[in-house]
Every structure is written in structure tokens, then in C-alpha cells.
Amino acid sequence: MTTLPSYTTDVRRLEELSALDLYAMLKMRVDVFVVEQECPYPELDGNDPACLHLRLLDGRDLLACARIWRPEPSDNPRIGRVAVSPDHRGKRLGEALMRESIAACEQAYPGETIEISAQAHLQKFYASFGFSPISEEYLEDGIPHVDMLRAKP
């Protein structure tokens, strides 16, 4: 059984991040979503200023990150840009990241349904956190996805 590394959870608005912290987070997202997944898309999509940014840290080392936001006032809050550093995979950080993201989302948007756009091959992983599919599989930036909801607590 893999032991979960120690980490601290940090949740901030974009403007509260230092330049170095912002750089590390954006670099990880580009490394994972654009380079590793070979998916050329606009990672800097203009939405980050409206988001809460959750990071799992080991000291100053960024282990994983996600963003939490509500695209429109009538929309469900969303968890997105869920990424674990390639250097720290296989340590159950994905599970920790989702638990922390759900908790932060529930704190920011109490009693609301949470939505995600999940890569289709991760449906079982997200289902383990109470998410259920609400759409057929579709391509987003060339990668199969499915929309999923987590019912109100």
C-alpha cells in the first residue's frame, strides 16, 4: 500500500499567489494538459482570475492543484484543472486532491451540487467521490470527456 506523503492545503484567489507560486502552478498545468497529454489548447483561458486555486504543497514543492469556480451565477460550482505533478504520481495524491477540492468547494458554495468535466477514462475514480455521469461521452480538445455531478450534501 502506498503511503500518502505529508502535505498542506492552500486555497487562494489568483491575485493572492506570489509570482513564483503562480508560475509553478501554471507550469504544472501546461506540463500535464498540453505537453504530457499532447493537447494543444488555450490553457490560459481567461477564467483563472474568477477561480479559487487549491494547491497541495510539501513545503514549497507543488504536489497537485485544482481550481474551483462558478462560470455563471446560475451554474453549478465546478472543480477543474485537476492535476498531480508527474514527479509525485502513484502516491494517492489524486485522491487527496479531490477530497480537499470537494471540501473547499463545499465551503465556498455550501449545500450546492458540484460539477466536473471528467476525462472519460477517469469516471470510476470520480464516481468514488460521489460523482455521477450526466452526459454522453464527448470530445473536448480531442480527449473523451463526460460531465458529472455530485449531489448536494
Image: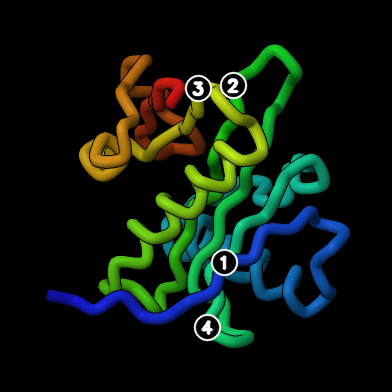
Residue 60, picture quadrant: bottom right
Q: Residues within 10 Å of mark 2 (few under 14, many from 20)?
A: some
- Callout 3–callout 2 Cβ contact below 8 Å: yes
Label 1 to label 4: alpha-carbon separation: 9 Å
Q: Which residue is mark 1?
A: 9
Q: Which residue is mark 3?
A: 113
Label 3 is placed on what type of residue? Answer: Thr
Which type of secondary structure does the marked residue at label 2 adopt?
Answer: loop
- Callout 4–callout 3 Cβ contact below 8 Å: no
Which is more N-terminal, label 1 or label 2? 1
Label 4 is placed on what type of residue? Answer: Asp
Q: Which residue is mark 4?
A: 58
Q: Nearer the viewer, residue 63 or 110?
A: 110
Which type of secondary structure does the marked residue at label 3 adopt?
Answer: loop
Which type of secondary structure does the marked residue at label 4 adopt?
Answer: strand
Q: Which mark is residue 76?
A: 2
Please tell me which residue is depicted at 51% across the width and 46% down the height of the picture. Answer: 103
Residue 152, picture quadrant: top left
